[in-house]
Amino acid sequence: YLLLLLKGSWNGRPRLNTAVIRQATAYGVRGQLGTLMQFFNYRLDVLLLGHFRSLEEVGLYTLAVSLAEFVWYVPNASALVIFPRTAVAQDEARSFTPLVFRITSIATLVAAVVLAAVAEPLITLVYGPAFQRSALPFYLLIPGVVCLGAAKVLTADLSGRGLPGYNSMGALISLIVTVALDFLFIPPFGPAGAAAASSVAYITTLIYTLVVYGRGAQAYPWTLFRLGWSDVRAVREAIARLREVRPR
C-alpha cells in the first residue's frame, strides 16, 4: 500500500543502493546492540528476583516497575523529537537539545513527585491491601527512573549525530551495574533490593551519558543545567502554539 502511495516519487524502476544499505546496516547494528542490552537491563532484575525470591515478590515488584515507567512518557516523546531534529541540523541542536533536556527533566520530575504522592493509596485502592508492599520498591525506583528519563533526551541527540555506539556502551555499563547489584541486593532485600539496583544503574547511565554527550556535541555537560529566561519564553511559546490548535 505504501509503495502504491509512493509510486510517483521516483522516476523509472526502484533500484537498490548498496552503499546506503551498508551504511544503514552498520548504523542499525550499533544501535540495536544497545537496544537489546537496555531491554535486558529493564527486565533481567525480574528474572533474578524470581530465581532468588518468591513469585509473590515478583508480582509486587512488577507492579512497582509498571507504575514507575509511567514517568517515561514525557522523555520518550521528547526523544522522538530530538532524534530527527538533531540529524537534520546538528549545529542548531547544540542549543535546542539542552533546552529540551531542561524542560523534559523538570516535567519528568514533577510527574514523578505527583505519582509518588498518590502511589500508595492508588495501589491499595486499585489492587487491594495485598499489593501495598509494592510502594517501597516504587519509591526506590523513582530517582533512577527520573535520571534515565533525562538520559533518553541526550541518547536521542547522540543517535541523531550518528553516534549510537555511545548509547550501546552506556546500556552495557548499566547492565553490568544492574546484574552486579542484583546479586548483591536481591537475596537479602527482595523487591526493594531489585529496585535499588535498577535505580543506581539508571543514575549511572545518566552520568555516563552526560560525559559522552559533552564529547559528541562538543559542549560542556554543565551547560545543560543552566536555566534561564529563554527556557521560560520557550515554554510560553509552546503553550501559545498549543492553544492555537483547534480540532477541525
Image (cartoon, helix red, strand yellow):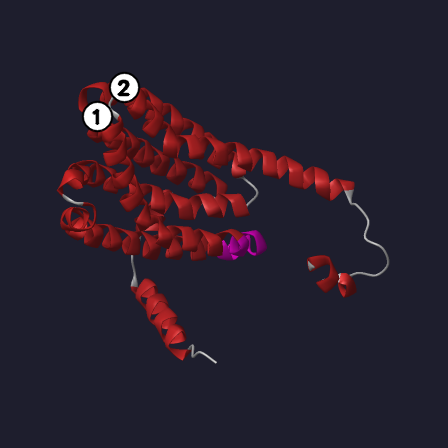
Residue at coordinates 38% horizontally, 57% vertically from top-left? 99
Residue 225 coordinates in the image, percent (x, y) = 31, 50
- The magenta stretch is 84-93
Identity of the amino acid at label 2? Phe
Residue at coordinates 20% horizontally, 51% vertically from top-left? 113
Residue 73 coordinates in the image, percent (x, y) = 36, 52
Among the 4 quarters of the image, the one containing residue 106: bottom left
Report if residue 167 lies within the magenta region: no
User: In the picture shown, does residue 97 fall above or below 221?
Assistant: below
Q: Secondary structure at mark 2?
A: helix
Residue at coordinates 35% horizontally, 71% vertically from top-left? 239
The residue singled out by tag 2 in the image is 52
**248 on left or right of 125:** right
Among the 4 quarters of the image, the one containing residue 201: top left
Question: How many other residues sit within 10 Å of disc 1, few (<14), some (14-19) or many (≥20)?
Answer: many
Q: How many marks?
A: 2
* Residue 108 in sight here: yes
Along the line of sight, which residue is nearer the eye, 139 or 226?
139
* Quadrant of the drawing holding the N terminus: bottom right
Q: Which mark is residue 231?
A: none
Identity of the amino acid at label 1? Gly
Mark 1 or mark 2: which comes first in sequence?
2
User: In the picture shown, does residue 144 fall above or below 45?
Assistant: below
The residue singled out by tag 1 in the image is 190
* Residue 170 in sight here: no
Q: Looking at the magenta stretch, what is its main secondary structure?
A: helix
Q: Are marks 1 and 2 in contact (CB under 8 Å)?
A: yes
Residue 247 coordinates in the image, percent (x, y) = 44, 78
Real-space CA distance between mark 1 and mark 2, rounded to the nearest whole angstrom: 8 Å
Residue at coordinates 47% horizontally, 47% vertically from top-left? 156
Residue 46 coordinates in the image, percent (x, y) = 33, 29
Q: Secondary structure at mark 1?
A: loop
